[in-house]
Image (cartoon, grey):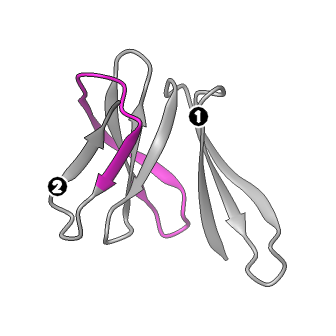
Amino acid sequence: MSAVYVSNADGVALSVLTLDAATGALAPLQTVEGLGMVMPLALHPNARVIYAGRRSEPMAVLAFARGADDRLSPLGEAPLPASMAHVAVDGSGRWLLAASY
């Protein structure tokens, strides 16, 4: 199985779904609630960390570890100066870029 990560801005949560590659079926695995309005997501090049931009107060980038079972565990957060519409990680994994417009 593979995992699909979905930001639910109105639901103030991140959903983790399992994907059956043979059938395309999705099934709920985990919901991480109470995050605020999270929308842009970025995957670290090592695929073990997912970053989410929180676009509601307090604005921040949130980091989550991906477990062997594809579930998310919070790692931490860092403040952002504004609501970011896009987040990305450079190929080395050292730098996180956040952009607003």
The N terminus - image quarter: bottom right
Front of the two marks 1 and 2: 2
Residue 93 x/y as whole percent: 21, 64
Which quarter of the figure has residue 48? bottom left
Residue 90 x/y as whole percent: 23, 62
Left or right, residue 4 beside residue 99: right
Mark 2 residue element:
loop
Q: Is residue 58 above or below residue 96?
A: above
CA distance separating discs 1 and 2: 25 Å
Residue 92 x/y as whole percent: 18, 70
Q: Residues within 10 Å of mark 2 (few under 14, many from 20)?
A: few
Residue bearing mark 1: 13
Q: Is residue 48 above or below residue 21?
A: above
Residue 39's disc number: none
Based on the picture, tell me whether residue 40 belongs to the magenta stretch.
Answer: no
Q: Residues within 10 Å of mark 1 (few under 14, many from 20)?
A: some
Of residue 72 and residue 60, the one placed in the foreground of this image is 60
Q: Residue furthest top?
A: 57
Of residue 23 and residue 40, the one placed in the foreground of this image is 40
Amino acid residing under circle 1 = Ala
The C terminus - image quarter: top left
Based on the picture, tell me whether residue 71 belongs to the magenta stretch.
Answer: yes
The segment highlighted magenta reads 65-88
Residue 29 x/y as whole percent: 69, 55
Residue bearing mark 2: 95
The residue at 44%/19% (across/down) is 56
Q: Residue furthest bottom?
A: 22
The residue at 35%/46% (across/down) is 87
